[in-house]
Structures are given as C-alpha cells and as structure tokens.
C-alpha cells in the first residue's frame, strides 16, 4: 500500500499557512475568503467549493481553516485529494506542519491504483513514514484480497503492517480465508503471522473436493515461490473431508502437497487412528496418496465398536498407500506387530496376532485381503471366546476418538454457518 496521496495534504495545506509568500500553492477557486478570531486566535478561512493545486496535486473541500499559532490547518466537508491515479477522500482532514503529521476522519477512503482502503479514521507521520487506520478498516488490494480489521498499522519504509482486532484476510483467487485477532505481515518477504484463535479455511475448486480447515495457537504463512509454506503451532488442528489431524506443530507445503506433523501427532481417516513421533501425509490436490509414520508408529481401526474390538498395527515405521481414496497397502517395518480380527460368513471367529521384521497388509475394496510377514515370523490364533471376555490389545494402544477434529469445532471457533 502506498500513502503518496496523503503527501498531497502536506504539500497543499502547508502553503496555506505561509500563503503570503505566494509561491508554494495555487488557489484555483474558493467562493469566499475571510479572517476571524476563534478563542482569541486569528485564523484565515476559505469557503465554498475550495480547490487548491500544487505540482499536479489537487485538493477539494467545502471549507479550509488555518490556525497559525497552533500550526494546524483543517479541511472540512467533502475532502478529496487527487494525485495522479491516487485519491483520498474523507469528511475531515487535519495537518500539523511542524511535526509533519496528518489526520483524516470520518468516511476515509484511499484509492491507489487497484488498491482501495476504507476506514473511519487515519493518521500518517512523514517523519517516521508510519500510518495508522482504525474503526472498520477494510482494504482490497490489486489481487482482490479483502482485508478487514479494527485497526491497521503500516510502516512505509519497512513495508511491514500489523492488523489488530477482528482480523479477516480473504483471497478469492486462492479460495482462502484467514481469521484471527492479530496479524503481522512483511510485504518484502511475503511472510505473515496470525494469532488470537487463528483459523485458516480453503474452499475446494469444485463440488468434488472438501473444505480445508487449520487452526492453532499461532499460524504462519510464507508465500515465497521457493517455500509456499503454511505453519500451525500450538494445538494445531487439521480437517479436510474424512482426514483429520492433531499435533503440536504442523507444516503444510502447498506446492508439493506435503503435510508434516511433528510432536505428538495423531491422524484419523474413516475409522482409523494413527499415532507416531512424526507423520508425513502426501496429497495430490484433495486426494490422499501416502502417509509415512516414523518412530513407534501405531495404527488402530474399529472392527466392532460395541464390543471394543480394534484391528491394530505397530512398528518403527508405518507406510500407508492409497488409491482412489482407499487404502490398498500398509507396510510396517521394524519389530512389526499386528492384530487382525477374523470372521466366518459374517460371524466373528477370533483374531490373528502376528509379528515379524516386516509386514505387508493388502486391501481389496477397503477390506484386508491378505497379510505377508517376513523376518522372524511369529503368530498365533486367538479364539473368539477369549476375545469376548478380554479384548486383545497391543502394548501402547490408546483410542482417542474424542480428540478427533470436527467441522463443528472449527465453526464454533470462528465461523457461523
């Protein structure tokens, strides 16, 4: 965002204070000029369709007043400043020449090329190159991104901005919406940070896709082409269709489709729950391609929720492979163990407990088709009567369905349907 248009009020209003020199401002038109005394101070007043010009910058207002002893000038009513393709409008403008500080108030609107900012009040310092707009601040940039906040701070020199209160950043081109209480953005590095119950939403390209939700204590976005990364930290939560995740730290590489879950990650999809030290999810658009679990991976899936039966796998690493949104293979490596329940013509008939160096589980139509075990193979068949009285569990089993992120959770956090 540029604030060159605001410099027009400095160049135009400052000469009014020194109008006697006659060489800094050109009065194009005013219906009336007068002098008076306000609170013991002599002032000069221009009234009626006031129009002044300097170096191609034009200022229009209904009334302009100069307070010499206070070193301030006021422009009141239909204030409009035009500088090339930049236009600033408001109901009231004020400028302090000694400190080079300007204020605009009520119905503030700044148009700079394809960028538009509106608010109820604004300030700008030409000594520090810093600006502040507050009360119902709204900005639309050249990409169509819509930014809302109670207050916006901007440093023209560093190109850094800060949004405070009711922050909303919507990008129709990317189909994304970011909500939070506070946000910081660096236009030079294309990096942003959002705090205060932040929430990221991305809508699908078409009706076949699923909406993506991400939340955390803090969200970070890096939109540089070489990175294009989104990061959630502190109680990070993820949901897209049937895929849900929970971890302390979550990294999403949008260019490659990699989701990197670190520190206490858990993943749920359909009736499956997966935990590990680190989990990498590889996606292709809205489709899940592969999931890699490193460091004591544990997988559990519901077999019979009424009787508490779960199919289970654990090992030093787990690799899930998907095809057309269905599991077609699971690979378990390093002290691999599994428990799979059996049925005979729809009736439960015990469970297989198997261990080895490596397990390969093949699926057909979403159901286990066969299991291949290699290296140090051990196994036994558990009778159904034993399982009924004592549901079998691998060491480390923990079912945490209550922690699974839901769509309602994200809507309760920030969005109202």
Image (cartoon, grey):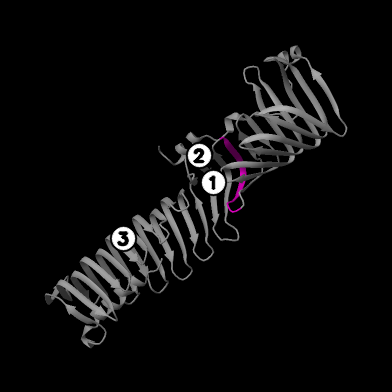
Indicate the position of residue 80 as horizontal and vertical percent values. Answer: 25, 68
Indicate the position of residue 106 as horizontal and vertical percent values. Answer: 26, 59
In the rendered view, tell whether residue 375 sits above or below residue 228. above
Q: Which residue is mark 3?
A: 121
Q: Which residue is mark 2?
A: 208
Give the magenta range. Answer: 242-255
Q: Closer to the camera: disc 2 or disc 1?
A: 2
Indicate the position of residue 372 as horizontal and vertical percent values. Answer: 80, 31
Tell me the element at label 2: loop
**What residue occupies the far right of the structure in this picture?**
376
Q: Is residue 88 left or right of residue 312?
A: left
Label ID, residue 135: none
Can you tell which quarter of the image residue 234 is in?
Answer: top right
Q: Is residue 287 left or right of residue 27?
A: right
Determine the main secondary structure of the stretch shown in magenta.
strand
The reply to whether residue 105 is in sight is yes
Depth order, front residue of 415/310: 310
Real-space Cα distance between discs 2 and 3?
44 Å
Task: Please identify the quadrant where the N terminus is shown.
Answer: bottom left
Q: Which residue is mark 1?
A: 217
Tag 1 or tag 3, which sits nearer the N-term?
3
Q: Closer to the camera: disc 2 or disc 3?
A: 2
**What residue occupies the far top of the structure in this picture?**
385
Q: Is residue 346 left or right of residue 179?
A: right
């Amino acid at each position: 965002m540029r604030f060159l248009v605001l410099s027009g009020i400095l160049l135009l209003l400052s000469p009014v204070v020194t109008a006697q020199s006659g060489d800094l401002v050109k009065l194009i038109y005013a219906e009336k000029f007068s002098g008076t005394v306000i609170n013991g101070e002599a002032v000069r007043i221009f009234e009626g369709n006031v129009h002044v010009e300097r170096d191609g910058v034009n200022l229009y207002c209904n009334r302009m007043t100069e307070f010499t002893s206070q070193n301030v000038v006021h422009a009141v009513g239909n204030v409009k400043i035009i500088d090339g393709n930049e236009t600033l409008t408001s109901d009231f403008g004020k400028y302090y020449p000694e400190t080079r500080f300007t204020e605009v108030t009520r119905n503030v609107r700044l148009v700079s090329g394809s960028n538009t900012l509106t608010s109820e009040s604004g300030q700008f310092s030409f000594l520090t190159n810093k600006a502040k707009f507050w009360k119902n601040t709204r900005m639309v940039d050249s990409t169509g991104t819509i930014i809302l906040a109670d207050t916006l701070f901007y440093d023209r020199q560093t190109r850094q901005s800060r949004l405070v209160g009711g922050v909303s950043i919507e990008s129709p081109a990317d189909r994304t919406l970011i909500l939070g209480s506070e946000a910081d953005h660096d236009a030079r590095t294309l990096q942003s940070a959002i705090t205060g119950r932040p929430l990221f939403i991305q809508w699908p390209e078409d009706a076949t896709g699923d909406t993506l939700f991400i939340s955390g204590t803090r969200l970070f976005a890096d939109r540089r082409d070489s990175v294009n990364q989104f990061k959630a930290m502190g109680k990070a939560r993820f949901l897209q269709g049937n895929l849900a995740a929970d971890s302390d730290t979550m990294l999403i590489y949008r260019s490659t489709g990699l989701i990197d879950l670190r520190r206490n990650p858990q993943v749920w999809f359909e009736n499956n729950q997966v935990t590990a030290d680190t989990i990498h999810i590889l996606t292709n658009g809205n489709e899940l391609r592969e999931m890699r679990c490193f460091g004591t991976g544990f997988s559990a899936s519901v077999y019979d929720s009424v009787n508490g039966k779960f199919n289970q796998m654990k090992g030093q690493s787990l690799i899930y492979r998907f095809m057309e949104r269905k599991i077609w293979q699971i690979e378990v490596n390093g002290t691999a163990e599994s428990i799979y329940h059996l049925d005979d013509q729809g009736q439960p008939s015990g469970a297989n407990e198997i261990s080895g160096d490596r397990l390969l589980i093949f699926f057909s139509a979403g159901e286990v088709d066969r299991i291949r075990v290699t290296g140090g193979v051990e196994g036994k068949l558990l009778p159904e009567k034993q399982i009924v009285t004592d549901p079998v569990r691998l060491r480390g089993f923990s079912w945490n369905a209550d922690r699974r992120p839901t769509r309602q959770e994200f809507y309760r956090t920030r969005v109202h349907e």
